[in-house]
Image (cartoon, helix red, strand yellow):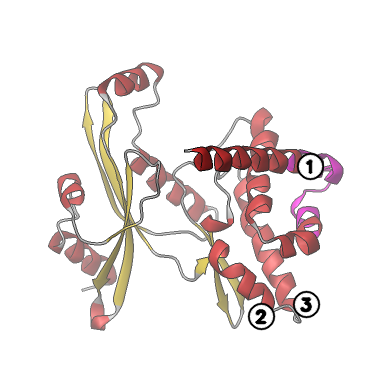
Amino acid sequence: MNSVQFEQSLLKRENLDTVEGAFEYKAGRELTKPGLRMRERIQIELIGEEGKAIRWYLKRYGRRPFIKRLLDWFIGTGRVSPARREYENIARLASIGVPTMRVITWGEDRDLLGAGRSYIIVSAVPGEALERCFEDYLVKISDDADAMKRFNRALVDIVRKLHEHGFVHRDLYASHIFLNPTPDGPELYLIDLARVFSPARWRRFRWRVKDLAELKYSMPAAWVDKFWDDFLGIYLREGESFSKWSRAIDRKVAWMRRRNHRRSKAKKVQ
C-alpha cells in the first residue's frame, strides 16, 4: 500500500471522507480562534505506517444563513465554497514553487444557491510559525551573518514568488510563515491560503503593500530595525522606488497599530 492509499484508508476509517462525516467528527483538538463564526479548525493526530505520528488539520465551514447565501448567489460570490477556494489556492501556489501544505482531501455540499457546508484537511508543514520561534532563532544565529543572510533571502524568495505571479496572501503575518531550520539552511512554508487571490493589475500595488505591512508589523522589532530595509531593497524589482514603497508600507503599519490600539481599548471597556 502506497502513502496515498494509506491516507485514503485512514480517512475512511475515521469517517473523514465525506462532508457529513467531517462535520460529525468529534476527536482532535479545537484550534478555533474567537470571532471565526462559522469556521472551525481542528488538529488531528493519527498513527501512520510503522507507528509514526501523523498530524493533519481539519477546517470546517458551516452553512451561512439563508438571507446571506441568497445575497451571495445574486452577486456571484457564493458559488465557490471556502474549502474549494483554499484547495485551488494550494494547488496554484504549489505549481509556482511556493512551499505550502498538502491537501489530504476536501469536500462540499451544494444546492440551488451554490456551495453550502464545506471542509478541507491539509497536512502539517515542518517547523514552527515565525510568530512563536523567530525571536529564539534570531538569538541562536546572532553571530552568524551567513545564516541571517540565508534566512532573509528565503523570506524574500517566498514573498516575491507569490507576488511576481500575481497573487497576494491578505494575511501575511509571521503566524502564517513557518520556519524549519536544516543543516542546508532555513526552509520557509506559507500556510492559511483561503484568502489568497489575484487582484487586477492596477490594484496590485495596494495589495502588495498590505501584505508587506502585515509582515513588517508582525515580525520582531529586533529584526525589523536591523534587516527590514535590506529585505525590502532585495524584494523590489529594478525600477521600483524604494522610498515610495517604504512610505506606503509604513503608513499601513501605522494604521494597523492605531486599529489594534482601538480594539484593545474597546476590550478593556467591555
C-alpha distance separating marks 2 and 3: 11 Å
Query: In the rendered picture of this protein, how many numbered marks are placed on residues?
Result: 3
Along the horizontal axis of the image, is 4 left or right of 144? Answer: left
Residue indicated by mark 1? 245
Circle 3: residue type: Ala
Of tags 2 and 1, the one toward the viewer is 2
Residue 177 horizontal/vertical position (percent): 55, 59
Residue 11 is one of the magenta-drawn residues:
no
Q: Residue at x 76, y 38 (%)?
A: 248
Q: Are marks 2 and 1 in contact (CB under 8 Å)?
A: no
| Mark 3 nearby-residue class (10 Å; few <14, some 14–19, many ≥20) | few
Residue indicated by mark 2? 140
Badge 2 marks a residue whose secondary structure is helix
Extreme-front residue of the structure: 269
**Is residue 98 in view?**
no
**Is residue 226 in view?**
yes
> Considering depth in this image, is 243 or 183 the residue closer to the camera?
243
Q: Residue at x 33, y 68 (%)?
A: 55
| Mark 1 nearby-residue class (10 Å; few <14, some 14–19, many ≥20) | some
Residue indicated by mark 3? 145
Q: Quadrant of residue 134?
A: bottom right
Badge 3 marks a residue whose secondary structure is helix
| Segment colored magenta | 230-249
Extreme-top residue of the structure: 74
C-alpha distance separating marks 2 and 1: 31 Å
Residue 248 is one of the magenta-drawn residues:
yes
Circle 1: residue type: Trp
